[in-house]
Image (tube, coloured by chain):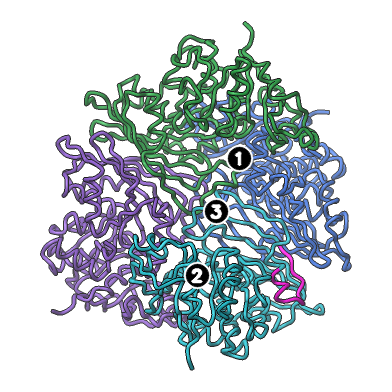
Chain colours: A blue, B cyan, C purple, D green
Amino acid sequence: MAKIRVGVAGYGTIGQRLADGVAMQEDMELVGIADLAPTLSLQALRENDMIGANGVRYNLYLVDGADPAAFAAKDIPVAGTFEDLCKNVDIMLDSAPGGVGAKNKANYYEKYGVKAIFQGGEKNSVADVFFHGYANYEKGLGADYLKLTSCNTTGLIRTVDCLDRAIGIEKVAITIIRRVADPGDYHRGLTNALQMEKAPTHQAVDLMTIMPHVNATGILVHTPVTHGHIITVLATAKDGKKITKEMALEAFQAHPRIRVVSIDEGFKGNASLFKYARDLGNRRGDMYEIGLWEDSIVESGNDIMYAINIPQESVTIPETIDGIRAAMKMQPTRETATAETNKYLKIGRFK
Amino acid sequence: MAKIRVGVAGYGTIGQRLADGVAMQEDMELVGIADLAPTLSLQALRENDMIGANGVRYNLYLVDGADPAAFAAKDIPVAGTFEDLCKNVDIMLDSAPGGVGAKNKANYYEKYGVKAIFQGGEKNSVADVFFHGYANYEKGLGADYLKLTSCNTTGLIRTVDCLDRAIGIEKVAITIIRRVADPGDYHRGLTNALQMEKAPTHQAVDLMTIMPHVNATGILVHTPVTHGHIITVLATAKDGKKITKEMALEAFQAHPRIRVVSIDEGFKGNASLFKYARDLGNRRGDMYEIGLWEDSIVESGNDIMYAINIPQESVTIPETIDGIRAAMKMQPTRETATAETNKYLKIGRFK
Amino acid sequence: MAKIRVGVAGYGTIGQRLADGVAMQEDMELVGIADLAPTLSLQALRENDMIGANGVRYNLYLVDGADPAAFAAKDIPVAGTFEDLCKNVDIMLDSAPGGVGAKNKANYYEKYGVKAIFQGGEKNSVADVFFHGYANYEKGLGADYLKLTSCNTTGLIRTVDCLDRAIGIEKVAITIIRRVADPGDYHRGLTNALQMEKAPTHQAVDLMTIMPHVNATGILVHTPVTHGHIITVLATAKDGKKITKEMALEAFQAHPRIRVVSIDEGFKGNASLFKYARDLGNRRGDMYEIGLWEDSIVESGNDIMYAINIPQESVTIPETIDGIRAAMKMQPTRETATAETNKYLKIGRFK
Amino acid sequence: MAKIRVGVAGYGTIGQRLADGVAMQEDMELVGIADLAPTLSLQALRENDMIGANGVRYNLYLVDGADPAAFAAKDIPVAGTFEDLCKNVDIMLDSAPGGVGAKNKANYYEKYGVKAIFQGGEKNSVADVFFHGYANYEKGLGADYLKLTSCNTTGLIRTVDCLDRAIGIEKVAITIIRRVADPGDYHRGLTNALQMEKAPTHQAVDLMTIMPHVNATGILVHTPVTHGHIITVLATAKDGKKITKEMALEAFQAHPRIRVVSIDEGFKGNASLFKYARDLGNRRGDMYEIGLWEDSIVESGNDIMYAINIPQESVTIPETIDGIRAAMKMQPTRETATAETNKYLKIGRFK
């Protein structure tokens, strides 16, 4: 079977990782990446002779408005225009800045019959389906335009969907302890301050869009760290059923994209998980799984409460790859699709 | 009526503020403070000629093991020994390091018939009553030894007790986003990391000791900031009753020690509240009230969720003063006692 | 003698403290303050019934563009317009946002013959004299428009001028370890990052404007903290003269606005000094003196190296008050003027 | 020629990277690593089936006191004892906790005729030569016991030695803006505080041991960040010679282990360099080169001032590999030895 041809629009924090993720899939071909300016990320790619993950060459295409001379000045080779890239792909992973994806769709994707998967920055209306690989894979089957859930929502839904399929969930209340900036960010830091956002937080609202039978709300607080959000979740089962710690733990441990860890073994917080990913030698020090602390799980009456860690830079990559599989009808079910994604990304190896 | 004679053992972060709080009460006399070494806090007091809050002189007594020469070297005047102080007070506020309070009780308080109020660092067994001015004032009436709830628990209980009296509460699940160190601390910082604690967090357990009819649990995460914990609370009413945002808000707004604020008016997080206290010209930049964000209140099915800010250095001071009133039977009821404390501390002036 | 009538334009971080500083001077009258919107700082003032430092009432005047209804909505009393204030003062301390001072000068100060002192945000050209109370007081005598050095430059010059008068200085090279935000700031933080600025840093350039016989350069690095810049200074004496640690220390210890501290006695860093100021009960937890670590002073060949702490919110207040004394010819010399300022601000009490 | 057989004692932050570095050298064989407990780092290695950098298997040996059952419980394969490892290597890279290296030397290295290179935590007396690959390679030739300079000193000396060989240096004064903890550390953080150390800082003293003809002193300030120290250096040439910016820049640009960067191209601070290393796909997100900001270089009279970034986790690896080359007499000169190290570590590729 011919490989699915994939492009990546925008080579920022997410785009780089999408390109890496596609380069790892043996049933996909990374045709190219596209960007506007010779960023440090592109200079790093050039320092590696344009070779990315898995030994794959990342061909660079320039979006409208890019200045070829600026790339030449940095000695970065250019393969063509964004339009050229669009003509040669089946599907585009669009991780351009918020709002640009909608323009790309209008200007190119529709014109060339290119499917697309948008990231969290775009409005929901840009897509036919608001998508999560585990929670609603089948809705994405054959769809032209998908939008991925944001990093927090993606990780959160992994656990709520996991409990829902095992036990049946009716309601969740979450507290997001959000890392305020990515490593390397100089434009959105916070110094010695926690910052409130108005409730309810959008991640709870988004969860309800993906899982409409669940009532969700929550509060988000920004914290001055860079390595991974932490979310506490209080989940209520349907029909007044009690969720025990054992029931929840069993469900979590069976999920390939949830890494159950404990404080006792040394996972003291989000920084421990980042360090562990670096110690694993993972590219960029990334981790695709969310962490879930076994020793955070407590019963609250009939409800269950637990805490998870969201590696914000990389967590949406697997579900985006799942999205390609759905849109291109590569696998018919969530089980078969996520299994393929996981295999190539080496997810669940530790189980 | 003769003023109640009060001593303060330990002039650290809490002890200094207890002394200030007592100095503000016109029906109490701060007989003296006691400490072990000529700390920077005592050097600051000496720089002010031993004059503290409200123009009151803070006479210094030395605890066992203190070296008078060390105080003389810093030119800090000494009024006597801790035993001298014990002989001259009706009640001691003991904010000595954890464990020392129990020794003080055995060595001095019992001997001289001095009542005492211990802070959160002591074991519960040191006291007859685990005390909170609003939640169980009457239990402290005439008691010899009280122990105050810790900073987070004190602020948390203000809100849960407030809802409980207005509506009736059966269950709470909390997430504590804890500031990891006080301003000026160099011995317990955290850098670019969130740190988990094993659940359930002790504050939930402590709440159940004070309010045994409430089921409480929760998760605590340390964050690298210094100015105020933030707690999210999910509260469930008794008998399946629904709590609306309006019901909760009305109750909170009527509580003198809860300052209802909003993001819209500029209270963006814990640092805004610290700045506001400094702008008020409050001594040490302290605030006695907890902050509660109006725009954090959301309904979760029948439950209510909200976020509060705990000014960790000063929040227990009013309830400790209440404890003096209870132990000394200065006022017979929580209403009359807390009203006196509030009046002298200028709490609720903003209402 | 009639008191000098002073106004303060802009009631932000600096403006509040300028008002406090003037309110402490018994030979000055704080006629009023002016601002544009009912900020939290003004709400805090109202919560105190408009009473600020030293029991002085701070009358509020509205600048052009202010909406009186917005102040009424917050129940903040208004005394008049900025123009009204200008008519009633001898001199205005202008701490409005950068650029506004120049407009105020053109629209009001020149019209009503009001002298003015601008803060660091304005361009040098707005003023006749770039001013520092200790380094060039006499230049400000009788001047109409002064501009104060910025916080780092003000503290830095205290020490360089101090050494220069004692020993003679020819060259300094500085490293500014800058706190990136003030307590309460949510708009300019930095998270887990040090940030470089292009060299040479403007503080070195500014020093040369005030002390033209000194060659100065340096590098500035932003750090994610809120409580006080730290500057290391390497100073070279004139004529190849050696500066010993003893010579430097003797000079520093004699300076009223330099507080010589040591790590040994517990001043571990900038946070210790902030804590000490709070323990002193200083309004807003402020300190007017810079800290200088005795155990940071080292000889580098003939040169001397040392580290200082700059309390960024309050350090320029004394020199601004000195500026009033110069502009209004209240005292003829730096010695007499700074002595008056220091007396009312209780600076040097600890010596 | 037979490959040099190398062991690594201690698989912590430095030990892991030493193992990686050796695994990259085609003229060396990593015989094994040794540790005491089944740390998270070793669990990560096992998750990779004990395969480390460059596809090399890292055989694990247990040091005295290790409990084999603890390793078995984590399913981590063990190849033998530390003594076994010692019998099979030519040289040991000792990155055990401070003080353990001296015991290892006494108990094993001397007994089995194993040479060793110690890291900064050991006392200088443990080694025959205090070593830096560029500054004193020849002193290490054939030596049995070397001690490497610490991370800051290693990077600092690269630049001072570089200038010294090009121009001749007589004196340096440094300010170290130190990152206080490594990513993942939970035991030594700092929160919203800068912390002073007594001057002179040991890095300056150490520099003088390696480069005895240079007078060095300096001040160190800890800052709450995790990704790279920044040092400012003021260097004075011999004989009153002036160092221009051009002279310094030319020397720095020619050095393989100095990466000259600029704020203009986007390297805003230490976090940018960490991000760039991650974007490069470097194992663990590490970088071997120090960064040196071109736009930080300024002239101070005849002296030159500049700022460098020290990637603390990885910077000493190349010089340690150089140490193997010296001790084992693999190459006779610094030029030939460092060229081999650089080639295998892919250092200087960007030049």
Residue for point 72% across, 26% down = D60
Which element is circle 2 on? Answer: helix
Circle 3 or circle 2, nearest the eye: 2
Which element is circle 1 on? Answer: loop
Total of numbered circles in the picture?
Answer: 3
Mark 2 and mark 3 in contact (Cβ < 8 Å)?
no
Residue A201 horizontal side relative to residue C145, left or right: right
Residue for point 63% across, 11% down = D3
Residue D343 horizontal side relative to residue C221, left or right: right
Mark 3 and mark 1 in contact (Cβ < 8 Å)?
no
Amino acid type of the residue that numbered disc 2 sits on in the rendered structure? Gly
Other-residue count near label 3 (Cα within 10 Å), few / some / many at <14 / 14–19 / ≥20? some
Looking at the image, the residue that sits furthest to the left is C332
User: Alpha carbon of mark 3 to alpha carbon of mark 2: how far?
Assistant: 19 Å
Residue C219 is a magenta residue: no
The disc label shown at residue B188, or none: 3
Which chain does the residue under circle 2 lie in? B
Q: Is residue D317 visible?
A: yes
**x then y, percent, for residue C81:** 31, 78
Q: Which residue is mark 1?
A: A10
Residue closer to the observer: D85 or B297: D85
Q: Earlier in the sequence, mark 3 or mark 2?
A: 2
Other-residue count near label 2 (Cα within 10 Å), few / some / many at <14 / 14–19 / ≥20? many
Which segment is the magenta one? B206-218
Looking at the image, the residue that sits furthest to the bottom is B1
